[in-house]
Image: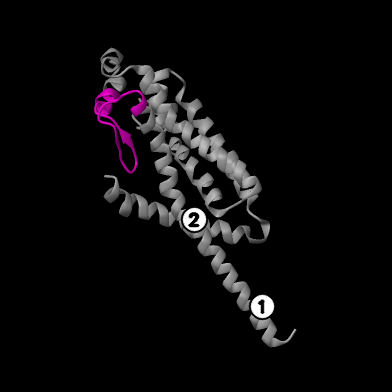
Amino acid sequence: MSSVESTFTQSVRITSTWRLAATWIGASIIAVPLGVLLHELGHLLVYRLFGFQGVALHYTSATHTVERTFWQLIYRGDVGAAASLSPLWKVGLATASGIAVTCVVTFVCCVVARKSPHPLVIALGIFAPVRFLSGLATIPVVLSGKPVRAGTDEAHLAALTGIPLLLLIFAGLLFLALAWIWLVRRIPKDHRWVSLGSMVCGLALGIFAYFWLIGPRLLP
């Protein structure tokens, strides 16, 4: 191979790598708001279905008029007063719906990635269950016997149903680990490290852009 051909081939490879990286970064940036909003829409749709008043979508939450008061009463142990504001079973289903949507989105991404490992599919499947990592900070609190005041869906669901919080946390973490292993293995080996590095960079950029710049302005 001549030096000209060698230079041309190397240039093509560099260009191709940068295009691949840019594709993964762009897809990962999009995956962040998509993953967050799909989860919150799960709550929102059930709130509307059950006729909750003052339902609103925010960039990191879906709320209704008596939501804050309801959970304050629940954690104070005044279940009767909380139930007078909203039926417990309706709130329980609305709380579980966000978790369910996250699991469904992740599962669908895993299924689609089996045949078509598109960067957006992989990135969304990786990011959507990231929320389960929030349970890590709660584990030592539960083990120490202190009262849990975490505002996570798992903590709310445990308070309403009596399901052990640790069980919900570890189930979420197991689901996340299995999904990540499956999805990473779907990335072609010949460019897996470039794709993974680009995805991590894209997710970091997406988190910063959505949580600190775009989200608070669009959906305060």
Q: Is residue 26 above or below residue 92?
A: below
Q: Residue furthest top?
A: 80
Quadrant including the C terminus? top left
Q: Which mark is residue 27?
A: 2
Q: Is residue 164 left or right of residue 14?
A: left
State how far apart marks 2 and 1 are (Cα). Answer: 27 Å
| Residue at image coords 37%, 54% | 208
At mark 1, the secondary structure is helix
Q: Which mark is residue 133?
A: none
Quadrant including the N terminus? bottom right
What's the residue type where badge 1 is placed? Answer: Thr
Q: In the depicted view, which residue is nearer to us: 73 or 42?
A: 42
Q: Where is residue 124? Give x, y as percent.
A: 50, 47
Q: In the depicted view, which residue is nearer to us: 10 or 136?
A: 10
Q: Which residues are magenta?
A: 48-72
Q: Which residue is mark 1?
A: 9
- One can see residue 67 in this view: yes
Q: Is residue 9 above or below residue 60?
A: below
Q: In the depicted view, which residue is nearer to us: 133 or 101?
A: 101
